[in-house]
Image (spheres, grey):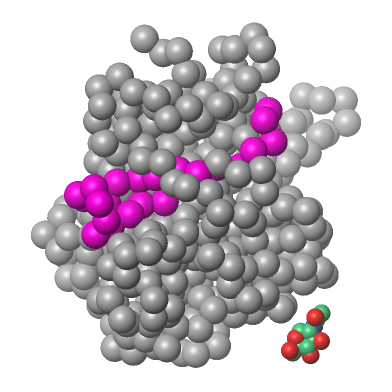
Amino acid sequence: MCLHIASLTILLIALSTARASAPEPFSDFQNNIVYKPPADHASWGTIYGRSLQLEDGSQYVSIPQSPTPLSVLTMCSLLTWENYLPEPPLATFPIMKSVDGGATWHSHLNVSDQVHDWGLRYQPNLYRLKNDVGGFGAGTILLSGMAVKSDLSEGWLDVYVRTDDGNSWTFQSSVAHAPGPLTTGNGNKAVWEPFFIEHDGELICYYSDQRDEKHAQKLVHVVTTDLVNWSDPVDDEASDVFGHRPGMTTVAHIQTTDQWIMTYEVCDGPVSGCPSHFKIAPDPREFGAIEGTLVVSGEQGRVSGSSPYVIWTKDESRTDGGGIILLSTSNSETVWVNEDSAHPDGWREFPAEQRSAHSRCLEIIDVKGQKKLMITSAGWMASGADNYVAVGVMDVPTYNFS
Ligand SMILES: *[C@@H]1O[C@H](CO)[C@@H](O)[C@H](O)[C@H]1NC(C)=O
Ligand SMILES: *[C@@H]1O[C@H](CO)[C@@H](O)[C@H](O)[C@H]1NC(C)=O
């Protein structure tokens, strides 16, 4: 196909006018709106956004100038979140997709509850297998989250697997049963907030657990080698005080030191709010024995917010090969950063200027061969809040920013 330059220009002008508010493809931006819930939405409308970048088999770009036409596998990003539309139909996990570095998004799929007919309601989590697990090859995409009855009386933490063609998801296994009710009331037997990592041939699923009568809520993990059978839960954090509520585990591997960092909030604990804490361990299955440390800014003495999300990446500004720990907490538009040593006085706040939210997601993505940080915000657990899903894409912070 040959498009005349003049008509191409007109087309581009028309496109840019139509999308006056969308950023340039593959550019840097903050607070780029992906989805706004309708006015008649239920509950919070949207919260708990999660992104995942992957190679996109459906998007081959051919390069006609090349002697033998090449096909280049491009990258795409998927986004999901807790979505509160009026029911029926039952709640689903929406998946939106971007093929231009997060600048524009379209509805790709809505994943519905294939097992219980209750609805997929809470804490969706996208994950790409780094290694083969059982019959599933490296690169397989998982979606986990809470299937919950609409009256919140019972729930399951379930895992879905994306089919090879990318166009559907299939239920794979259940990780944990929640006899209910699924509310944060102490004594109610809920589970929440799955998070995956791989280690030593195992897929580990961390989650929050209200089922143990000795703890209002504690943090546990289970492991699998086949995505079918899951082990019994092992504690990662449980307070001696019944009412303390550690929650929302995320974990990252600090490659340079081969240590693992776990971050979590503690609600109704010794420090007011639900500030974030961290633990460092050589084995991500052995956080239970480690004492947690409050995340406080070493410069201002500011206490971190709730609902942390931690990742690790190389710090490109360093000459010693070292990395940077990046941590989102709810009380600011910043990203907390620390060096690989994770020294308790080492936390600094980088001004990312991406909308604060309950449990923002951090991800290092590839934008045309460049490493960038994507931050996803999807709103607050507050009925009156002006919630919507928005992403930011920016240079990866360096520790010694000024
Ligand atoms: C997903 O659900 C939303 C809301 O009902 C709808 O607007 C959208 O078209 C659906 N997406 C697909 C791919 O079916
Ligand atoms: C998984 O669990 C089922 C039921 O408990 C058992 O029959 C099966 O042998 C287990 N499979 C593996 C691979 O352990």
Where residue 69 appears, x then y in whole percent? Answer: 83, 33
Q: Quadrant of the C terminus?
A: top left
Q: What's drawn in magenta, residue-wise?
A: 256-279
Note whether residue 386 is visible. Answer: yes
Where residue 269 appears, x then y in whole percent? Answer: 27, 56
User: Relative to 42, is 264 on the left or the right?
Assistant: right
- The single residue placed furthest to the front in the displayed view is 240
Residue 261 or 243: which is nearer the viewer?
243
Where residue 217 appears, x then y in whole percent? Answer: 37, 69
Q: Residue at x 82, y 25 (%)?
A: 66
Q: How many marks?
A: 0
Residue 273 lies in magenta, yes or no? yes
Note whether residue 3 is visible. Answer: no
Residue 106 lies in magenta, yes or no? no
- Residue 368 vertical position relative to residue 144 in the rendered view, above or below: above
The quadrant where ligand 2 appears is bottom right
- Residue 267 vertical position relative to residue 232 in the rendered view, above or below: above
Q: Quadrant of the N terminus?
A: top right
- Residue 2 vertical position relative to residue 181 in the rendered view, above or below: above
